[in-house]
Image (cartoon, coloured by chain):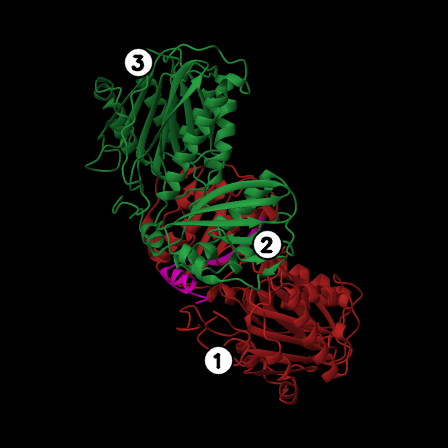
Chain colours: A red, B green
Amino acid sequence: MASKVSPLAPNVIHPLPALPGVRLTARECGVRYKGRKDVMLMEIAPGSTIAGVLTKSLTCSAPVDICRKHLKGGKARAILVNAGNANAFTGKVGIEAVDRCLKATAKSLGCKVSEIFIASTGVIGEPINDKRITDNLPALIKDLQEDAWNDAARAIMTTDTFEKVATRTAKIGDAEVTINGIAKGSGMIAPDMATMLAFVATDAKIPAAILQTLLAKAADKSFNCITVDGDTSTSDTLLLVATGQGPKHKKPASATDPILKEFRAALESLLTDLAVQVVQDGEGAEKLVTIDVSGAASAAAARRIGLAIANSPLVKTAIAGEDANWGRIVMAVGKSGEKADRDKLSISIGGVEITRNGQRRPDYDEAPVAAHIKTRDVHIGVDVGIGSGKARVWTCDLTHRYIEINADYRS
Amino acid sequence: MASKVSPLAPNVIHPLPALPGVRLTARECGVRYKGRKDVMLMEIAPGSTIAGVLTKSLTCSAPVDICRKHLKGGKARAILVNAGNANAFTGKVGIEAVDRCLKATAKSLGCKVSEIFIASTGVIGEPINDKRITDNLPALIKDLQEDAWNDAARAIMTTDTFEKVATRTAKIGDAEVTINGIAKGSGMIAPDMATMLAFVATDAKIPAAILQTLLAKAADKSFNCITVDGDTSTSDTLLLVATGQGPKHKKPASATDPILKEFRAALESLLTDLAVQVVQDGEGAEKLVTIDVSGAASAAAARRIGLAIANSPLVKTAIAGEDANWGRIVMAVGKSGEKADRDKLSISIGGVEITRNGQRRPDYDEAPVAAHIKTRDVHIGVDVGIGSGKARVWTCDLTHRYIEINADYRS
């Protein structure tokens, strides 16, 4: 399925460092794909905490239901993930398959079922052959390694063309902790809490309730600000594990504890990195589009305006065609349903202000805008002239390749 | 711009009959296009009433602002329309251009400025050269004819590949009245009150307030139930004129007067006909997709679920690829934000029930579904298992041709 690598892929994908308290492995289990690894297991040290944000889809998958339930306990010993089959809309047989996977993993690791998390991505509505997973559990556990992060990131890919990894360090007091993350996603990307699959771990020691607040806040500025095609997945799952196996540090008192300042910034930076990589691997993407909205009634309003632009097929095809058709941006702002002052609306592309006071600037020179839009990295700025709310969102262009990929994905 | 005729176009486009109280003409004025008629004038008999529904876009065009204002008077003597330039986001110069057109037309016809309606469609953000229109007014008025409906319908086309016309008759008491309508639209179609441009006239005699209620209700079941690309136009304008020049009939007391029963049905049928023609001429469309949603919490909820399916690029590309990938329908229902019972969700394609009780039917045979999806007329049925709300919406598939049309529309 994954063919030519996206032209927006990073030039070099660095291997993630080992992270104390986490071991991983990936294996070819033949759940659906042949000739590639398709299952990943992340083993987590006893005593680790976990937080998560999950899709708001009303037709969410069986694994999402289970994660939501297990997150209440706040403790994790393993995350088991397969690609190729989303185990979504599979009814009772889907739930039974999840149960068998959870029980087998818990038994193998000697922990509670409620400490196992599971995620599945791929085709919707097909019963999953979970025996392919459980039969391979002993081998998966035997192969667990500290440095298999990139291998794990590759095993969870579907239409992705490159693995998405990111790492950051941050000081909590004098202790330097690490955060590692992997993600997958390429199509059906319009996160409504998290996008597709992302698994993040830190060796810091943070209580589950605080971890949850930190994660939700950072997800809101990263995964919740991207879109590829406006279609929200049934499987969106973002999990954050804290093993507490890194350098010793003072226990944070709350999510807003000043001791976590660097950690909060590092987490948001890492999630944004992963989220933008998902857009860079957007199905058929040839350009990354960054949209900054300002002057809105609130930050939430700014994000909705940004996403209205980011999801507009007419804006996205204009960018694919390298046509600075900014009238379509006007249209998208107008349809967003959010307050905007048509007669104060200011639009820029590539830093060049095109409109002012509700009309095209008399001195507008299209040449630098036309040159900018031919690059791989397109920037759109919109000020809607109402208030001080702002947001940044990311999307990609809409190309022929998107149609090619999606007109025969399942067959 | 308009090239190959849509494969979904009607085999024969019948000329509309004359309608007492309306004369029309179309002319090549060179507003933007060359070598085709691009301005249409509809002259309406004195004493006629008018109703309209207009885009809710917050970046609506100057002509939309004017129509909204003039509709308060409820009287019409002319509708002036140009294609090629939407006169949207053109600031003060756009408003001045509209003023000049209105004044010149009112002067030529000897009526009030508030009785003139105007609509513009085409590129957004370019100042319009209204002199091209006003200079041609004497010739336009000289050429007014009773049977120029189809000519007028062609003059308002942009990326449309065929003109959209429809006619109906209805009895009000013993009098048989006629309704004629023309429309244009192909891309930027996700009406939020009306879609793009549609001009409808009847020779019945109906007070403006009643006409408005009838129109809003019928638009809600027709134009507000279609989408091509989810992008709402800055120019959506649907106007309905009643000339009162047809056979004499009793004055209706209200919009729900039983005397109007046939008229209400005929109006909804005519608007639906025009709306479906817009989808059939959807940019790049190769298949017309009709989606029936039932079992929703309300009719409005059913429509939103239907539009979530109809706007999903993944559903639309699957249909373009003739792939019965019904899992994407599950996804779209899930993202709609409307109440649905995942475990009662039933999906059918071409009348074949695929899922029941939240999973694929064990006896599901894909063969008849695969055969159905290869036709030009695809039907999707969804029951969300909550209540008794239902709605029908129409869309088209998303093809390579859509990308081709929109990646270089303006250049």
Question: In the picture provided, is A164 more to the left or to the right than B40?
Answer: right
Asked whether the residues under the numbered discs 1 and 2 touch, taking CB atoms below 8 Å apart as contact, a structural biologist would say no
Task: Read off the residue under disc 3.
Answer: B109
x and y percent of residue A240 in the render? 67, 70
x and y percent of residue A44 in the render? 70, 79
Q: Chain of mark 1?
A: A
Residue A34: assigned label:
1
Q: Amino acid at mark 3?
A: Leu
Asked whether the residues under the numbered discs 2 and 3 touch, taking CB atoms below 8 Å apart as contact, a structural biologist would say no
Question: In the picture provided, is A341 more to the left or to the right than B42?
Answer: right
x and y percent of residue A247 in the render? 73, 80
- Name the N-terminal-most of marks 2 and 3: 3
**Tag 1 and tag 3 share a subunit:** no
Asked whether the residues under the numbered discs 1 and 3 touch, taking CB atoms below 8 Å apart as contact, a structural biologist would say no
Mark pair 1, 3: CA separation: 75 Å
Q: Amino acid at mark 2?
A: Gly
Q: Is residue A129 magenta?
A: no
Task: Read off the residue under disc 2.
Answer: B334
Helix, strand or loop under label 1: loop
Residue A222 makes an appearance in the image = no
Foreground tag (1 vs 3):
1
Which segment is the magenta one? A390-411
